[in-house]
Amino acid sequence: MSQLLKKLQEEMKTAMKSGDRDRLSVIRMLISEIKKVQIDKKRELTDEEIMQVLQRYAKQRKESIKQYREAGREDLAQKEENELQIVQEFLPQPLSEEEIEKIVEEVIQQTGASSMKEMGKVMKAVMERVKGRAEGSTVSSIVKKKLS
């Protein structure tokens, strides 16, 4: 069993004992999502694969928050934000824009990329290095800025 799944199960037990219903609900949902993917793949997931499941769940929360705010439903947006905070506890700390820019510059130097034609090559290398710590849209905008 992966370390991350063990940690989630420990946190679930802690939430049960403390009576924190919101936290318990979110952690149960995360474990459920992980088990669903394990059943689909017919094997145990690695920590990296579990991280991807958590990131996908976090991204869904962010999209929901945006939609609820646009619809004027601050109460539901707040609920989603609380869920997002719990999920983020299990994700690695995101990189700052400055850290991403540094990585992009290093990759551009290493690959010798000089134009937008080589954006795909740069993006692939950068995304491998920032795995789970930066959103693709942020990385993409920085790479475009550096290559143009």
Image (cartoon, grey):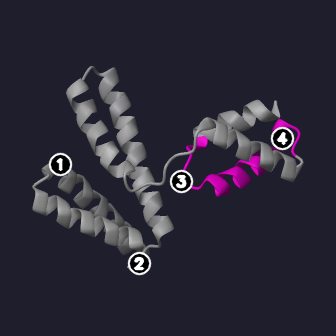
Going from the N terminus, do you reach mark 1 or mark 3 first? Answer: 1
Tell me if label 2 and label 1 are in contact, CB under 8 Å: no
Which numbered disc flags the more N-terminal residue, 2 or 3?
Answer: 2
Report how far apart the C-alphas of labels 3 and 4 lie in the structure: 25 Å
Question: Could you say whether the residue bearing mark 2 is in a helix, strand or loop?
Answer: loop
Mark 1 to mark 4 CA distance (whole Å):
47 Å
Q: Which mark is residue 112?
A: none
Q: Image quarter for residue 24?
A: bottom left
Q: Residue at x 41, y 78 (%)?
A: 44
The crowding category of the residue bearing disc 3, from other C-alpha atoms within 10 Å (few below 14, some 14 to 19, many at least 20), is some
Please tell me which residue is depicted at 19% across the width and 63% down the height of the picture. Answer: 14
The segment highlighted magenta reads 113-136
| Label 1 CA crowd tier, 10 Å (few <14, some 14–19, many 20+) | some
Q: Residues within 10 Å of mark 4 (few under 14, many from 20)?
A: few
Q: Residues within 10 Å of mark 2 (few under 14, many from 20)?
A: some
Residue at the disc numbered 3: 132
Looking at marks 1 and 4 on the same chain, the residue that comes earlier in the sequence is marked by 1
Inspect the image, locate mark 3, and give the three-letter code of the amino acid beneath it.
Gly
Tell me residue 32's x, y (percent): 27, 63
The amino acid beneath tag 2 is Glu
Q: Is label 1 in a helix, a strand or a loop?
A: helix
Residue named by callout 4: 117
Give the mark, 2 or 1, whose residue is nearer the N terminus: 1
Which residue lies under the disc numbered 1? 22
Residue type highlighted by circle 1: Asp
* Residue sitting at x 42%, y 59%: 53
Give the residue pinned by disc 2. Answer: 44
